[in-house]
Image (spheres, rainbow, N blue to C red):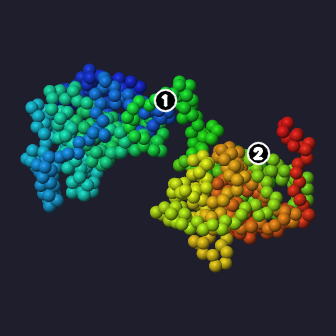
């Protein structure tokens, strides 16, 4: 490398890196690098977004518009024009490269012969840009099996020549270019060519700051040794926000920022210290437990995050839930009714005693179903939410997505028994139709469901006094609610079939008690017991 100016990267993890950026290059801290001093270079990749989005966007805006820092927004002002003569010259070299394997030195010599490498009054600058270009092309060659004959090299080589003249040459064409050159700021996605050009600028000693709030380090395409410092501002943003054109008008208070910092440190996905509604934008998914009869009544009282196998991963909350049928009745009637009444006393409990409790949907939603399919043949939740037929638009967006994801899984892997002569497609269509008509009581239960906390439950009491027959639509609804993480407990003192007619027993637990009874009706807890429970 040229010895006219060596550099070393500043530590971007220290709080004063912006003040170093404002300091003229030759006034920065230096150390010896052979015969020449090594000056600190401000280069780094900044991934993720600060927990307070407004603070992050304000920081970017002020950085770009700070009069004491000459910032050039390269990502927005990349000059993609190329002179015809230069384009033809690089094409001639690439044609030679296509027909014979050139060494790196010969390739660079061809470029010099075609006057594709800039020459400056200061010969050190000419040497510097030639060596930087060689370093970049060697990086490309070493990371691709076919070296410079890789199919992507033509595009990279043309772009490098284009931008080297349009930007690097203009910035270096002064007596002391590092003192007068702008600080380069890149925001968002970078193509392979753009990544190599950014690496080229860093190799030339420019201050280069690369920001990607969604957490993607595109510079790794060129920086294969990960030499350029990386700083993680915070978690990756779900959506890549455009660079702020104006200063954010909302300002956060000190208390708000402190609260966000506490959330970032304490309320992580695996912290077990969950704030209310922390996962409201996450997708719920059921992890149905296989339990004993006694365990059923113990686990069902526990909050979701206390239950075995609770997990939050990839913005999905895996909720350990109960799906069980209790057939018959205990000899100890008092114990039985205490347990049953305990199930139904929760604020997030819906007790059902008359059947059917759902209705058969007769509408033909085939067009809506087909239009909601993704490229993999399964229902696409985003497409479902965009449909004008989607019935749950009034619900919070996170819950809508949770329901849509559950419907997609529920239709893709049907657990409902097909009717005679009903093929898989017809069964999926039936489930989709039924999912479009979740009863209001069940919807309200889902709205109260804070996924890490108390789990809603459906308690079904089925006896000969319950009236009509448990229907296929009832079974379909229970399967959907189970998919959403809701607990389902069916109590049938007669021991007769109900859900068994429509769902295989592999999908739920069946607990047989000592006796059967045909004359049991649901017993409400006494008034005294209700008052006692409220007090204590």
Image-based side of 240 in relation to 413, left or right: left
Of all residues shown, which one is farthest toward the left?
113
**Where residue 78 is drawn, which disc sits there?**
none
- Disc 2 residue crowd, few under 14, some 14–19, many 20+, Cα 10 Å: few
* Left or right relative to 293: residue 432: left
Which residue lies at the image location 63% right of the left edge and 37% below the top edge? 275
Residue bearing the label numbered 2: 347
- Rendering coords of residue 111 (x, y %): 12, 47
* Left or right of 208 in this view: 315: right
| Disc 1: which residue | 250
Image point (42%, 41%), residue name: 241
Q: Residue furthest bottom?
A: 421
Between label 1 and label 2, give the one nearer the viewer: 1
The foreground one among 455 and 75 is: 75
The alpha-carbon separation of the residues under discs 1 and 2 comes to 38 Å
Upstream in sequence: badge 1 or badge 2: 1
> What secondary structure is found at the residue carrying circle 2?
loop
**Which quarter of the picture shows residue 352?**
bottom right
Can you give x and y, in whole percent of width and height, for residue 311 in the image? 60, 48
Q: Where does the N terminus fall, quadrant-wise?
A: top left
């Amino acid at each position: 490398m040229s010895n006219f100016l060596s550099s070393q990267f500043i530590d971007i993890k220290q709080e004063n890196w912006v003040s170093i950026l404002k300091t003229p290059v030759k006034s920065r801290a230096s150390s010896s690098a052979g015969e020449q001093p090594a000056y600190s270079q401000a280069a780094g990749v900044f991934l993720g977004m600060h927990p307070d989005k407004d603070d992050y966007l304000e920081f970017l805006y002020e950085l770009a518009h700070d009069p004491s820092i000459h910032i050039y927004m390269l990502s927005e002002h990349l000059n993609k024009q190329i002179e015809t003569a230069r384009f033809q010259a690089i094409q001639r070299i690439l044609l030679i490269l296509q027909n014979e394997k050139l060494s790196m030195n010969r390739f660079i010599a061809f470029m010099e012969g075609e006057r594709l490498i800039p020459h400056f009054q200061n010969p050190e600058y000419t040497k510097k840009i030639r060596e930087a270009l060689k370093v970049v092309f060697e990086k490309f060659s070493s990371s691709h099996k076919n070296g410079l004959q890789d199919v992507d090299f033509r595009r990279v080589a043309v772009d490098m020549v284009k931008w080297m003249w349009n930007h690097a040459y203009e910035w270096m064409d002064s007596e002391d270019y590092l003192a007068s050159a702008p600080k380069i700021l890149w925001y968002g996605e970078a193509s392979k060519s753009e990544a190599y050009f950014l690496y080229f600028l860093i190799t030339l000693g420019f201050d280069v700051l690369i920001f990607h709030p969604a957490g993607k380090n595109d510079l790794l395409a060129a920086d294969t040794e990960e030499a350029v410092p990386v700083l993680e501002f915070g978690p990756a943003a779900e959506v890549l926000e455009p660079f702020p054109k104006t200063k954010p008008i909302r300002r956060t208070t000190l208390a708000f920022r402190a609260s966000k910092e506490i959330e970032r440190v304490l309320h992580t996905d695996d912290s077990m210290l969950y704030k209310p509604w922390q996962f409201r934008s996450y997708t719920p998914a059921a992890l149905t437990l296989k339990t004993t009869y006694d365990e059923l009544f113990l686990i069902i009282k526990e909050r979701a995050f206390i239950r075995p196998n609770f997990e939050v991963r990839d913005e999905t909350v895996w909720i350990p839930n109960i799906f069980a049928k209790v057939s018959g009745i205990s000899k100890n009637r008092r114990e039985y009714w205490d347990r049953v009444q305990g199930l139904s006393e929760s604020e997030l409990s819906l007790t059902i005693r008359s059947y059917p409790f759902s209705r058969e949907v007769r509408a033909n939603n085939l067009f809506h179903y087909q239009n909601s399919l993704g490229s993999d043949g399964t229902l696409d939740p985003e497409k479902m939410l965009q449909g004008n037929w989607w019935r749950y638009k009034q619900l919070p967006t996170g819950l809508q997505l949770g329901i849509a994801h559950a419907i997609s899984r529920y239709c893709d892997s049907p657990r409902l028994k097909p009717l005679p002569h009903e093929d898989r497609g017809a069964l999926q269509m039936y489930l989709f139709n039924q999912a479009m008509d979740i009863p209001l009581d069940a919807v309200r239960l889902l709205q109260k469901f804070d996924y890490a906390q108390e789990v809603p439950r459906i308690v079904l009491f089925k006896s000969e006094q319950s009236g009509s027959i448990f229907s296929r639509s009832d079974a379909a609804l229970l399967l959907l609610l189970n998919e959403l993480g809701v607990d389902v407990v069916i109590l049938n003192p007669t021991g007769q079939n109900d859900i068994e007619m429509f769902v295989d027993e592999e999908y739920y637990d069946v607990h047989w008690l000592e006796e059967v009874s045909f004359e049991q009706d649901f017993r409400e807890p006494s008034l005294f017991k209700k008052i006692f429970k409220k007090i204590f």
